[in-house]
Image: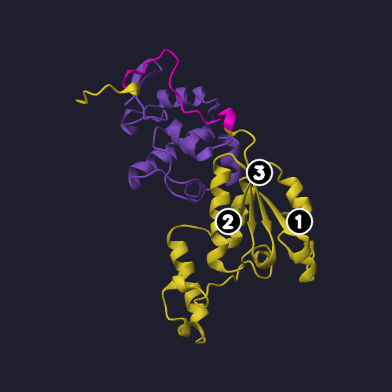
Chain colours: A yellow, B purple
Amino acid sequence: MTDTKPDIQSDIQTETPFVPSFDTPAEEGRKLAIICSKGTLDMAYPGLILGNAALGEGVETHLFFTFWGFDMINKKTQSSLKATLLGNTAMHMPQGLGGIPGMTHLATSQLKKAIAELDIPEVPDFLDQIVASGGHLWACRLSADMNHLTEADLRDDVEGIISASDFIEMTAGAQLLFI
Amino acid sequence: MPSTTIAGRQIDVNEEGFLSNPDDWTEELGAEFARLIGVDMSEEHWKLVRFLRQDYKAMGETPTLRRVSTQTGMPVKQLFTLFPGKPAKKMAYVAGVPKPKGCV
């Protein structure tokens, strides 16, 4: 090292070993709540990725599924979420193509392939991983009622169908993400 | 680059305290890293640490938690039990490899 500038850290040679602080008090009690409101394949992932990352950092994480997001925890639909060109100009394809039969299937399989190549699990497996990491899944009461769904229709690891006010109460002091 | 004395050896670490050069690692050092972060090493812990070192050497990067789980067959839940709180970072620290960069 030929750096002549004084480096504050270069002289750290304390008697107590310098060890990463994994469990700092400032981070204790940190809580994250993610509201998953979308039912398309592309928009299912942001919540899953961030929730999983938060759990890996030791943050208490709650995922609340509402509206279209219900498809992510509905046993019938969780494996068949789709991506579509329609209404999504960020796919950079002419919107007219999106209406052609088969295009949604094509967009979906392309996206699934790209996700699998990065070794990112499919939605049901990803939720399994989140629960195994200590994450909590909750379903929205109004969405359940609107779609005539009960707990029996949802993944077994959904901890409950709760109202919006239950959710607000439960996530007091949490950081909130709406997706 | 900061340095610190662990297990009677002076070693270079990065600004977070992770071992700078994975080649400086020895099992003795790994055992001391674990002790310092409050992890009581069992054969299962060592199995994961050995996998991390071997995978880092082969792939050039530290495996993510998902990769550790799929490659070793150890359930994610158990990884959280063995290295509580921040399993990916803690096992990387003990194994003397950088913390993982991958998102999933």
User: x and y percent of residue B39 in the render?
Assistant: 54, 27
Q: Residues within 10 Å of mark 3 (few under 14, many from 20)?
A: some
Q: Secondary structure at mark 2?
A: helix
Query: Residue B56 or A45: which is nearer the viewer?
Result: A45
Q: Is residue B55 above or below residue A150?
A: above
Q: Which residue is mark 1?
A: A164
State the residue at coordinates (34%, 42%).
B57
State the residue at coordinates (74%, 46%).
A170
Marking on residue A47: 2
Q: Main secondary structure of the magenta part?
A: loop
Q: Is residue A11 magenta?
A: yes
Q: Amino acid at mark 2?
A: Gly
**Which of the marked residues, 3 or 1, is nearer the chain's N terminus?**
1
Q: Chain of mark 2?
A: A
Residue A37 visible at all: yes
- How far apart are labels 3 and 2 at the CA level? 15 Å
Q: Is residue B44 above or below residue A42?
A: above
Magenta-tinted stretch: A10-26
Q: Chain of mark 3?
A: A
State the residue at coordinates (62%, 33%).
A28
**Which of the marked residues, 1 or 2, is nearer the chain's N terminus?**
2
Q: Amino acid at mark 3?
A: Ala
